[in-house]
Image: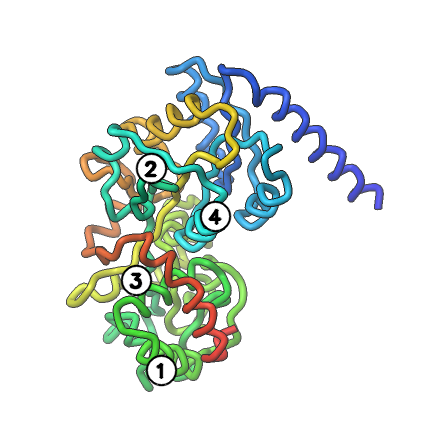
């Protein structure tokens, strides 16, 4: 009880501190679902270039959305940063973003990596991207790994497939992309067949799927690229041993391409420091920020001209990415939620 009260006091104090800074023209208040130490350098660099102080609250996506809902027009937040198309779409559909526009952002961020254009601008902009790959156990499937998401439904992968919960936004975004490409009926049939191939009930995160694949508990699994890249860059002997036991595939290279997702952000509806917020968004699209965003979490820049040097991503090589607009994937979330329930994909 005392611990819970202490957490509440700390949260209340942080809220008061950030509220006091909210009316300063020399500050920007950021609610971010990113929780990486590398972002400290990102914020410090922005302040160095602009003189604008960054105040931030970091929490899980849903916690941030709930906080914005409850705060309403009293929210001190100026910028909201989320890490998945599903979450960005939900925030936009609930009216938590203010529409924004910028020639700098339109020139830098590809149209497929932004929210759908509205009369007064865009709800959010994508700043870094990752891909959803298939990881496989080399001993079991090294001679003939699955080459597509559709392959996961094949009978030869009976009792071999592992995934995290389909209720997780990373999974919902992948399934939403399948609905967009294949239609709801075909995607439902595919999802039911994948469920029939499960090695175990869905549990854990993507790193757990990779580890279980290396041990042989799973034969194949879905993972975001940055989880694999983290293990590839690890100096721990056990992680390097794990990496030696698994391979990975860029799915659908002969078809639509591999599913990609984004970290994105936009100006909050009730932002008090809109000019500072826009300067922050434009900074996020700069070469310097794009490199820090991408390398800090082993992702790729959304700005096509930006080059990065990341040993794990370099080792993974190039791939054909699905060209579906990220906003389209977000719009299919409700259908994806309904479909995974029908398929029994818990």
- 129 vs 116, nearest the viewer: 116
Mark whose residue sits in front, 3 or 1: 1
Question: From the viewer's perspective, is residue 200 above or below residue 38?
Answer: below
**Around disc 3, counting alpha carbons within 10 Å, would you say few (fewer than 14), some (14 to 19), or many (20 or more)?**
many
Question: From the viewer's perspective, is residue 57 above or below residue 133?
Answer: above
Q: Pointers 3 and 4 in contact (CB under 8 A)?
A: no
SS type, badge 1:
helix
Furthest residue to the front?
Answer: 119
For disc 4, the marked residue is 91
For disc 1, the marked residue is 189
Residue 336 pos. (x, y %): 42, 68
Residue 291 pos. (x, y %): 31, 33
Question: Coloured how?
Answer: rainbow
Mark whose residue sits in front, 3 or 4: 4
The mark that comes first in sequence, 2 or 1, is 2
Furthest residue to the bottom?
Answer: 155
Furthest residue to the left?
Answer: 254
The Cα atoms of the two marked residues, 3 and 1, are separated by 25 Å
Mark whose residue sits in front, 2 or 3: 2
The mark that comes first in sequence, 3 or 4, is 4
Q: Which mark is residue 203?
A: none
Mark whose residue sits in front, 2 or 4: 2
For disc 2, the marked residue is 120
Q: Pointers 2 and 3 in contact (CB under 8 A)?
A: no
The mark that comes first in sequence, 2 or 4, is 4
In which quadrant of the rendered view does residue 242 lie? bottom left
The mark that comes first in sequence, 2 or 3, is 2
Q: Residue 248 carries which label?
A: 3
Q: In the image, what residue occupies the spot 46% across and 62% down? A: 211
The Cα atoms of the two marked residues, 2 and 1, are separated by 40 Å
């Amino acid at each position: 009880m005392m611990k819970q009260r202490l957490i509440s006091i700390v949260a209340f104090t942080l809220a008061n501190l950030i509220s006091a800074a909210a009316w300063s023209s020399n500050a920007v208040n950021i609610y971010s679902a990113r929780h990486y130490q590398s972002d400290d350098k990102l914020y410090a660099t922005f302040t160095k270039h602009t003189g604008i102080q960054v105040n931030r609250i970091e929490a899980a996506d849903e916690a941030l959305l709930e906080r914005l809902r409850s705060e309403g027009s009293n929210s001190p937040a100026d910028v909201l940063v989320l890490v998945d198309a599903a979450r960005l779409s939900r925030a936009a559909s609930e009216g938590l973003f203010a529409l924004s526009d910028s020639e700098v952002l339109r020139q830098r961020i590809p149209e497929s990596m932004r929210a759908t254009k509205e009369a007064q601008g865009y709800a959010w902009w994508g700043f870094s991207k990752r891909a959803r790959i298939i990881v496989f156990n080399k001993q079991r499937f090294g001679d003939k790994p699955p080459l597509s998401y559709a392959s996961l439904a094949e009978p030869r992968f009976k009792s071999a497939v592992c995934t995290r919960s389909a209720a997780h936004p990373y999974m919902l975004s992948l399934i939403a992309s399948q609905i967009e490409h294949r239609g709801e009926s075909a995607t439902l049939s595919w999802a039911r067949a994948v469920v029939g191939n499960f090695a175990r009930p869905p549990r854990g995160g993507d790193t757990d799927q990779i580890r279980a694949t290396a041990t042989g508990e799973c034969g194949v699994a879905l993972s975001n690229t940055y989880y694999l890249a983290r293990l590839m860059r690890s100096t721990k002997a056990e992680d390097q041993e794990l990496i030696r036991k698994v391979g990975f595939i860029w799915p659908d290279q002969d078809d639509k391409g591999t599913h990609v997702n984004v970290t994105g952000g936009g100006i909050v509806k009730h932002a008090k420091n809109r000019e500072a917020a826009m300067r922050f968004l434009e900074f996020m699209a700069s070469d310097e920020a794009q490199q820090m965003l991408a390398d800090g979490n082993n992702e790729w820049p959304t700005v096509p001209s930006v080059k990065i040097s990341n040993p794990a991503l370099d080792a993974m090589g190039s791939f054909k990415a699905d060209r579906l607009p990220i906003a389209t994937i977000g719009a299919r979330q409700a259908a994806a939620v309904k479909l995974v329930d029908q398929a029994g994909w818990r």
